[in-house]
Amino acid sequence: MVLYTSPFPNSFLSVLHSFSWGLIFPCYWLADRLVASFVPTTYEKRQRADDPCYFHALCIIITTPIYLALLVASLPFALIGFLLWSPLQSTRRPYIYSRLEDKSHANGAALLTEWKAAGTGKSFCFGSANVCLLPDSLARFNNVFNTQARAKEIGRRIRNGASRPQIKIYIDSPTNTSISAASFSSLVSPQGGDNTNRAVSVGMKRTTSMEYKGDNSGLNNSEDAREDKAGLGEPNEGEENSCIVRINGEENGLASDTEVDTVNGQPNAGGQAEQSPDGDAENSKTPNHKQKEGDSGSLDSYTASRESLVKVRIGDGSLDQSTVNNKLLYKASIMKKTSVRKKKHTDETFDHEISAFFPANLDFLCLQEVFDKRAAEKLKEQLHHYFEYIVYDVGVYSCHGCCSFKFVNSGLLFASRYPVMDAAYHCYPNGRGTDSLASKGALFLKVQVGSTPQDQRIVGYVSCTHLQALAGDTTVRCEQLDMLQDWLSEFRKSTSSSSTANPEELVAFDVICGDLNFDNCSSEDKLEQQHSLFTHYKDPCRIGPGEDKPWAIGTLLDPEGLYDEEVCTPDNLQKALESEEGRKGYLVYPTSKNHGSSQKGRKASLKGNGRRIDYMLYTEEGLYLEWKVEVEEFSFITQLAGLTDHLPVAMRLMVSTGEDDP
């Protein structure tokens, strides 16, 4: 299958499309600004609190006639442009595939090595987020604004979080997870140049949350290391050593006051981290997310707010020691050891956490609501610093391919560190209401993640989708889930080059990510909860229809509270969501006839831990029979605090081959 690297089949159509859009854009921009001036966000209201009450009204009185006059003047040109633009959409391709040619800018992808399936297995990390990058006037109805600046900052945070090394901190206590009450018993780190993890007794300084002050250089973008399930073991094939901090559950344990830097496997006291220049520093602060003390979400702040641990991990023994000392200082979010936590279901086999960062070594990223084209370009530019392959501007426009007129695309975006082999997009034809104006659908991708010594390709399938959003449209969403399954089955058949007798490809995973716009606890969503999709695909957060696991939390934030001091930074949001009171205050809860829609400040007993509408599903069906797929980690991520009204989610899958290391 040919991957489309441009939206039109020839340059003439591309130029004609650019010309027509140039005629439309002034009218579109003026209308957007005019509506936006009447829809203030809570952040703007607080900023204007000290201004005279007449000041804002005076600004609107002055600017509105100007916007209206210019809008009327631009209408004839917009009409001409629309008459050119609309028929061109019948020749437009359903997506744009972007591959970064200059790999020096893609630190994560440049250091990615091909998996040869010769070891015990390999892990792959998937992320999904609804980023609400609508035109600014529409985004304000979700209480977010400045779409262009947010797009750049979102991309920056994602690639900075993903490019840090994987650090695991385990608390061996079922009741006490406070760092201040923990004793730092051992540090596992690579010694010298060998591949064996060894425990080193060291003192660690209790400190505030750490910042990543690297410059996104290649040294921190290597493949993630994985802890052996039984304790300290050999690292998996293609993965580097990891540093793991274990914290005993002793209530009276004390920490040493020695700050630790790990350089070439040796602890180094008193290491200092130097500020690293970032070309985007001036633009990192978006108006709707002012950087405050303790905000380490973009990994560039120099003050901190939460107790954590200072920990540095090395990737390769050949690294320059001064570079590591001066540029590497990481924030490690606490991961609780599931084997000792009190859980309703004791058969839980994987780690789960609320993290202030996107997981290290993120391999695949699925985004929803990237509707604004200019914002998509800015986001793509930032993501290309880490992901080499990106599929964006997915969808159809005008009346092409769907029943109703489409003003915007599907909003889907896919980024990968592994090469994309095939891609296909389908538009849901049954959208209703305002959702029918967007070409919401499903994007299917086939990626190559390695090859066997016998030159068989190792591939994986990733699907990204966004379902009908309006409440009460249960039947519509169920129909869309039916179509999703049918399209995915068709895509797998059409792109498979293997036969049972002579397999040319080995399928390692099949994952579905996206905003499904229903949760597993609301009584109104019973039909979706019982859909056949969940018999073929597993949800790591779900026990069964209508019941989530106790540790699973909602992913839909209450828009009214996005800029509250308690949740406006990644660290603060993480801290708030770790408590039941914080979740009740800042998450939207399952709908109920007995409660209103506003969640702010409610202390009543509510079902579940919030509306979890963003999903990550995986299946064991249709994969290579001799391999086993299991969840290794699942995370709810707060790094985009103040930038979107959804919590991103991430899942790390371990593909076990069952073979011994050579």
Image (cartoon, rainbow, N blue to C red):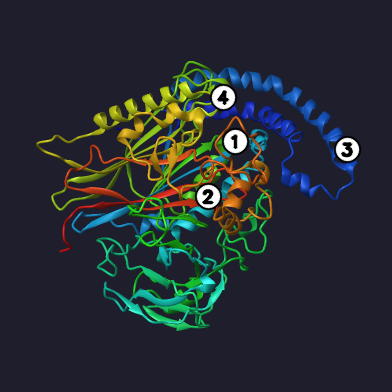
What is the C-alpha distance between the residues marked 4 and 2?
Answer: 25 Å
The residue under label 2 is which amino acid type?
Answer: Gly
What is the C-alpha distance between the residues marked 2 and 1?
Answer: 15 Å
**Of the residues under marks 4 and 3, which one precedes in the sequence?**
3
What is the quadrant of the C terminus in the image? Answer: bottom left
Under circle 3, the secondary element is helix
Whole-percent x, y for residue 31 in the image: 70, 29
Q: Which residue is mark 4?
A: 407
In the rendered image, which quarter is residue 209 located in?
Answer: bottom right
Whole-percent x, y for residue 308 in the image: 53, 69
Under circle 4, the secondary element is loop
**Of the residues under marks 4 and 2, which one precedes in the sequence?**
2
Q: Is residue 74 left or right of residue 464?
A: right
Marks 4 and 2 close (CB-CB < 8 Å): no
Q: Which residue is mark 1?
A: 134
Q: Which residue is mark 3?
A: 58
What is the C-alpha distance between the residues marked 1 and 4?
Answer: 12 Å
